[in-house]
Image: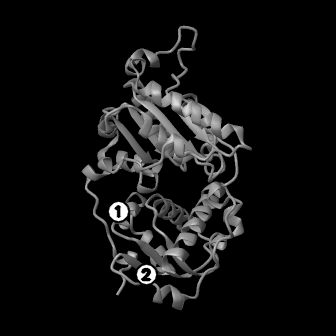
Amino acid sequence: MPQRLADRRPDVPVSRLIADMVPPPRFDAVRFETYRADPAVPSQAAAVEVARAFAASVGSTAGRTRGWLRRRASSPASAPAVTGLYFDGGFGVGKTHLLASLWHAAELPAEQKLFCTFVELTNLAGALGFAPAVSALSAHRLVCVDEFELDDPGDTVLVSTMLGRLAEQGVRLAATSNTLPDQLGEGRFAAADFLREIQRLADRFQVVRVEGEDYRHRGLPRAPDPVADAVVTSSATGDDVTLDDFDALTAHLATVHPSRYGPLLDGVRRVHVRGVRTVDDQATALRLVVLADRLYDLDVPVVAGGVALDRLFTPELLAGGYRKKYVRAISRLTALSRDGAASAG
């Protein structure tokens, strides 16, 4: 009898929150040399070179001095120092690959560099408290934040203040997002009310634009069609395979903090879901986005029955402020469903 994700309630100790902040399995072996830059898109190769130089500077003697972070005499006193790189571009252009490669290339002891998602960063502040979280992060010389996004005013102020404190401690920063830093929060809350915080956050990064098409589908056949629920059930064999009904799974996700979606998948080799339907509730949709990200990071294939995964979200949701998140989730789930079809036979 296969397990159900809906029966799992992971208890994650605080010590694991930081211990797990390394590149996930899918990106553990990536390097700059394995990045497949599209020859037709010059910005991709250019981004690799900028990232290489930044990684080298992090491990250099100059990178160890606090003086690098001091404002130039000609800079306005109110302007924050630029402390890192910000990879901006559409989904599937290899930004996470570049970020993980930067982490691997930085010549620092593993305990001095950290790789996490944005939700893991905010959860750490919630679990430890703001000051202890800053103290824990400032012990690192490099902090890489994937899927950078500001979804509410509280996170805007929290992250802006946290990065400011880390910059003062000499921490170098690198991040990825589908949204330029001065547009974070746009379309999701009253960003104008928090313009100062957002702008100060933007000023801390050198923006590196990465253009191109989604490599997950470049030159590949279309995603497999959804399979019958009976086939989803019959192919869910093995102790490390899970089988859930879609509605039960989404209801369970509402009771688990998104930062625990990774531990929710501990020991899981493949996920099977019956009765996938189109979602019109934003809260449910955003939880599915986080689950899709963790499935992708952990390289867990998906076998799904019901509606096609490109119909997972309603047109209204896809036209809203979280469009880029939803499109990224569809892209990643499509790739994982292709893997699921192959691994399940």
Q: Which residue is mark 2?
A: 243
* SS assignment at label 1: helix
Q: Position of residue 301 (x, y in %)?
A: 49, 70
> Of the residues under marks 2 and 1, which one precedes in the sequence?
2
Residue type beneath disc 1? Pro
Q: Position of residue 218 (x, y in %)?
A: 68, 58
In the figure, residue 105 lies in which quadrant?
top left
In the figure, residue 321 lies in which quadrant?
bottom right
Camera sees residue 73: yes
For this orientation, the residue located farthest to the right is 40
Q: Is residue 16 toward the left or the right of residue 179 in the image?
A: left
| Label number found at residue 37 | none
Residue type beneath disc 2? Leu
10 is higher (above) or lower (below) than 65: below
Name the image quarter holding the N terminus.
bottom left
Q: Residues within 10 Å of mark 1 (few under 14, many from 20)?
A: some
Q: How many marks?
A: 2
Q: Which residue is mark 1?
A: 263
Frontmost residue, 95 versus 207: 95
Q: Residue at x 60, y 73 (%)?
A: 279
Q: Residue at x 46, y 57 (%)?
A: 297
